Image (cartoon, rainbow, N blue to C red):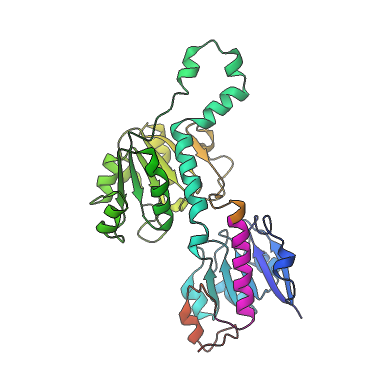
Amino acid sequence: MPAKISIENVRLFGVASDVSKLIQGHNVEITKVYFSRETPIEEICEKLGNPDIIIAGSMITYDRELFRRLPRLKAVIRWGVGYDNIILEDATMEGVIVSRLPPYLLNDAVAEQTVALMLSLLRKIPQAHEFVKKGGWRISSNLNEFEQLVGESLEDKVIGFIGLGAIGFRVLELIKPFRPRLILVYDPYVSRDFIRLSGAVAASSIDELLTYSDIITIHAPLTVETEKLLSMEQFKKMKKGVYIINTARGKIIDTDALLWALENGIVKAAALDVFDPEPIPPDHPILKMENVILTPHIAFAASKTCKMMDEYAIEEALRILRGERPLWILNPDVLKRDNLRAKIRVG
């Protein structure tokens, strides 16, 4: 009987790779399934079909109830880096391995998208694109319309980084040639010396960063500390006319507070690859705002990156099925439990 791997809500899985070659020579069967956040757990379990391994997206929550309903499940491998939708304690208690992809796979792609969004905001590229498509370049005699397309330069800006992990550091390196006036960093888990050697200045507090930054780019993980880190109180402290870019996690920003800040001119424009909730409801007011760029959580989606993500995810799954220790396990304590579902050779 072949081992079963379910690909859950990973729409880009297989787009940049030949999945049949990835599993060639292994007794493995792959199926792709899709759910919404509102899908009942009974339907989720029925469609998943009690797999051995799940390569997971970020749509559904993996908790004890789901693990108990899937008794054959040995491991959940997150097709990505963030794993806030997987409750590690529950997985460990139920003997399920949780793994993810190595973060370095995504660094360059997400960093490049961040810089692209930053420049698109400042230079009003989406507005200029629409202006040309609608015939404004050819027929407009109104100089005012052209004036509305005049953008801003990075060179004279203070750019604030919330978080300086691997992706944030790569963004910092990419924007240096644009000669920003100052790069401020707020990250309590990174040393001031490292920030200084990176060519930036350590902000003494989040408030200092919010007060002085012309552009704020977010590169922090979603944790108890960072959830709604940018709330109404924080938006009120920002310099009027600030730009916001978020390619990290949607829940780091309080959506209602962001809407208020956009409507009141505190935030001049925003570029969001992530949102809360995801996907954005079709009637959400932010969809009507012309000063917001939205992309569907695809900052990582360069073809090279997607190909490597497929390969690494399948390799990790096959490793577990062979009884080998997974390379990127998030809950190593599970390997010591008597109820470990995978037959991992430990030692």
The answer to which of 199 and 274 lies nearer the viewer is 199
State whether the magenta stretch is mostly helix, strand or loop. Answer: helix
Asked whether 279 or 26 is in front, the reply is 26
- Counting labels gives 0
Residue 304 visible within the image = yes
Quarter the N terminus occupies: bottom right
Residue 24: name its quadrant. Answer: bottom right
Question: Residue 79 occupies which quadrant of the picture?
Answer: bottom right
Highlighted magenta segment, given as a residue range? 305-325
Let me know if residue 307 is in the magenta part: yes
Q: Residue at x 51, y 11 (%)?
A: 142
Q: Is residue 277 magenta?
A: no
* Residue 299 place in picture, x, y as percent: 53, 49
x, y percent for residue 64:
53, 74
Where is residue 236 drawn, in percent x and y?
30, 40
| Residue for point 35% across, 59% down | 225
Q: Residue at x 30, y 36 (%)?
A: 239
Residue 243 picture quarter: top left
Residue 250 horizontal side relative to residue 189, left or right: right
- Is residue 167 placed above or below 102 in the rendered structure? above
Q: Of all residues shown, which one is farthest toward the front?
A: 177
Is residue 84 among the parts visible in the rendering?
no
Residue 178 location in percent, x, y?
39, 38
Residue at 49 percent across and 47 percent down: it is 112
**Apparent side of residue 34 relative to residue 185 in the rendered image (left or right):** right
Q: Residue furthest right?
A: 1
Residue 89 vertical position relative to residue 203 in the rendered view, above or below: below
- Left/right placement of residue 305 relative to residue 167 reads right
For residue 287, above or below residue 114: above
Residue, far left: 204
